Image: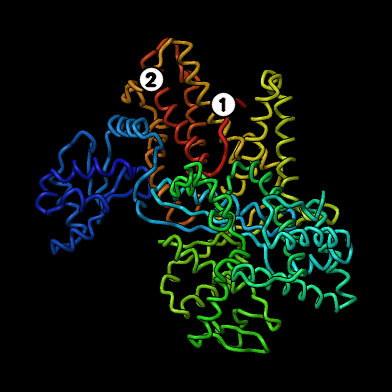
């Protein structure tokens, strides 16, 4: 409907009643909509505003406009219905116009409405030294879909993966490694000694003091240290001390000040844990076909490489990648955290409380924003404030958005309020894009957060592998020809398995809690990822059959007047609605709007498939009707493919 509004408005503007009311196409278009019930018509014109301008009642305006109606190429009839003018469209003309627009646009539904605007989008954001757990799925895939959807509307989107790579927890990790694996400290000491003997010159590639450790092993050390800390409170002080040494070292590096051997040791252990984590994260993101690069400013060597290769083209880089920017960046580069603290002190916004420096954003009876802890270390609030200031300064964001679970609502309320108190009016353009929980079925039949298998948190990579394995088995059972081609079968298994998990998440409103049920997720019928992909593949097979039957590829010349079924008209309307759904999904940060549009289109297509069982979509006895129907098939396929791609789902040509 949305894409037909211009044609409808132009036609109505020529009618006597609309001319008399001084209603030109620009005034008519925003007053056009879809009636609540299909039997009322195909479009509706609201008469409230023009009636007010004319000084008459809306009902009288509707009667007046209907009286002067004359049938046009697009609008077939008009009837007054209270304050509305119900319009019936010429189906053949409307379908033809819709199909022509789909065929004309490489990416149907895209627009330039966001041209010149920038969204800075924070999503995924795992902690280093911990495996990616299943709860990272929602922020990662919702954020990825929002990035793609906004870009489709002409926005520049700067995607940022805000790594949790700083804080007292890393002091505990370092203390734990020193306590339980002293050989790691000794290795780090040797590397640090070599560095200092080289007059502080960093080697391009130093050995890792962690050796062959895995991220899971680092996490086990951290958990063991925390467990022993319950019986020995002195360990907590040890962890804080190790972190303070690390933070002092980072700040000193930035200011080109003196460092200590202890700082050098802690820095190398921390950096090795970070590099190890990034390598594992990259493997996981590759499963989801996501690309993250290190932010050029953070990694000087990488920036030099990109500039040297002539590849540092920011707009292209922002479109093709999102960027890792760790919390440590805001501590160790230009001391951005230090600037936040100084500004808060100078402005009088910050206060001392129990030895800490805080901002009371919601009164002194509510938890404050922590800038400096009592031991002098920065807090995550400080780093979040610094990151917001840096992003706005670096990218001049029209909007700044954070894709983080709904349980963090208070944190973002405080963050945005603190920014406002510090004098940053652009805080009003910051948004918390919240989402619900991922729930798993428990042994007692209830659904709960953080489901466990034998007491272990579900690792996201394991979950995706399980989905892919399940699809592999379906391929072996249902498609022997595909199974025989191992490479193709593996590609399909990965696309369908991962796509099933992703679609299950994104088909629901992001604020809803999501039930993770394998039987539903991997179902090849219904509102599932596999079914959407199957419909996409099926539409391709119809086109292939048409080619084989008629030795013809000219379906774009198919006559829309041959599409006379109600099901075909319904499909055309859904296709025409897709650009509006895409625009709304962009505005509301809501990928489920796209998923629901695809579900509706797939369901209507299935009904049409049934309705044409006798006459067939490709009918050897009727080439003209076949050509028209295959034209519609290709429009369906294009919309399904575009929508699935925007949701981050890989397309396949076989199932």
> Which residue, given by chain and number where applicable, does mark 1 sit on?
653
Which label was assigned to residue 534?
A: none
In the depicted structure, whether residue 285 falls above or below residue 420: above
Q: Check the image and tell me how it is coloured.
A: rainbow
| Residue at 55% over, 54% down | 295
Query: In the rendered image, which residue does mark 2 sit on?
Result: 555
- From the viewer's side, name the closer residue of 530 and 401: 401
Q: Provide the secondary structure element on which disc 1 rests.
A: loop
The residue that appears at 77% across and 70% down in the rendered structure is: 262
Residue density around tag 2, few if under 14, some if 14–19, many if 20 or more, within 10 Å: many
Is residue 624 placed above or below 599 in the rendered structure? above
Residue 574, image x, y percentages: 41, 39
Q: Is residue 438 left or right of residue 72?
A: right
Q: Nearer the viewer, mark 1 or mark 2?
A: 1
Whether residue 538 is visible, yes or no, is yes
- Left or right? Give the position of 393 relative to 559: right
Front-lying residue, 631 or 40: 631
Relative depth, front residue between 265 and 386: 265
Look at 17% across and 56% down and name the residue there.
61
Image quadrant containing the C terminus: top right
């Amino acid at each position: 409907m949305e894409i037909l509004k211009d044609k409808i408005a132009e036609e109505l503007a020529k009618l006597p009643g609309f001319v008399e009311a001084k209603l030109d196409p620009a005034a008519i278009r925003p007053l056009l909509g879809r009636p609540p019930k299909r039997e009322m018509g195909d479009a509706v014109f609201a008469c409230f505003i023009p009636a007010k301008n004319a000084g008459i009642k809306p009902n009288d305006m509707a009667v007046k406009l209907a009286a002067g109606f004359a049938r046009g190429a697009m609008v077939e009839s008009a009837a007054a219905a209270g304050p509305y003018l119900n319009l019936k469209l010429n189906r053949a003309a409307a379908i033809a116009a819709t199909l022509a627009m789909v065929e004309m646009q490489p990416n149907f539904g895209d627009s330039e409405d966001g041209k010149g605007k920038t969204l800075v989008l924070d999503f995924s954001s795992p902690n280093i030294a911990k495996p990616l757990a299943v709860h990272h799925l929602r922020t990662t895939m919702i954020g990825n879909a929002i990035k793609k959807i906004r870009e489709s509307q002409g926005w520049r989107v700067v995607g940022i993966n805000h790594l949790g790579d700083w804080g007292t927890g890393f002091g505990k990790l370092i203390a734990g490694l020193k306590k339980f694996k002293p050989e790691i400290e000794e290795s780090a000491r040797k590397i640090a000694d070599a560095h200092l003997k080289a007059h502080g010159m960093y080697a391009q590639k130093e050995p890792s003091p962690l050796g062959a450790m895995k991220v899971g092993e680092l996490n086990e050390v951290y958990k063991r240290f925390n467990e022993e800390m319950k019986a020995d409170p002195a360990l907590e002080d040890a962890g804080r001390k190790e972190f303070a040494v690390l933070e002092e070292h980072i700040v000193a590096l930035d200011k080109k000040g003196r460092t200590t051997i202890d700082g050098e040791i802690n820095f190398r252990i921390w950096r090795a844990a970070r590099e190890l984590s990034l390598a594992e994260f990259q493997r996981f993101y590759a499963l989801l076909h996501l690309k993250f690069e290190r932010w050029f400013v953070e990694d000087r060597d990488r920036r030099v490489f990109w500039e040297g290769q002539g590849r540092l083209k920011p707009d292209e880089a922002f479109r093709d990648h999102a960027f890792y920017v760790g919390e440590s960046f805001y501590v160790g580069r230009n001391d951005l955290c230090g600037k936040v603290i100084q500004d808060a002190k100078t402005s009088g916004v910050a206060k001392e409380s129990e030895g800490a420096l805080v901002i009371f954003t919601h009164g002194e009876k509510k938890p404050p924003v922590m800038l400096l802890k009592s031991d002098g270390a920065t807090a995550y609030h400080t780093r979040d404030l610094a990151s917001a200031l840096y992003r706005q300064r670096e990218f001049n964001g029209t909007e700044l958005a954070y894709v983080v679970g709904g349980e963090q609502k208070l944190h973002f309320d405080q963050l945005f309020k603190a920014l406002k108190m510090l004098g940053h009016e652009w805080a009003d353009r910051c948004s918390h894009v919240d989402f619900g929980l991922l729930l798993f079925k428990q042994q007692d039949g209830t659904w709960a957060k953080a489901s466990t298998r034998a007491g272990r948190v579900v690792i996201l990579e394991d979950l995706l592998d399980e989905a892919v394995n399940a699809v592999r088995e379906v391929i072996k059972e249902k498609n022997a020809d595909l199974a025989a081609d191992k490479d193709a079968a593996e590609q399909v298994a990965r696309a369908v398995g991962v796509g099933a998990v992703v679609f299950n998440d994104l088909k629901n409103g992001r604020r809803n809690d999501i039930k993770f049920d394998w039987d539903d997720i991997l179902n090849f019928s219904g509102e599932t990822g596999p079914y959407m992909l199957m419909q996409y593949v099926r539409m391709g097979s119809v086109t292939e059959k048409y080619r084989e039957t008629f030795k013809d590829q000219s379906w774009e010349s198919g006559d829309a007047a041959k599409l006379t079924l109600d099901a075909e008209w319904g499909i055309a309307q859904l296709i025409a609605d897709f650009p509006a759904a895409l625009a709304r999904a962009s505005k509301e940060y809501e990928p489920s709007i796209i998923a629901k549009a695809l579900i509706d289109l797939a369901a209507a297509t299935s009904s049409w498939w049934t309705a044409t069982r006798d006459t067939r979509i490709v009918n050897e006895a009727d080439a003209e009707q076949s050509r028209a129907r295959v034209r519609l098939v290709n429009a369906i396929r294009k919309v399904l493919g575009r929508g699935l791609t925007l949701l981050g789902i890989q397309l396949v040509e076989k199932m």
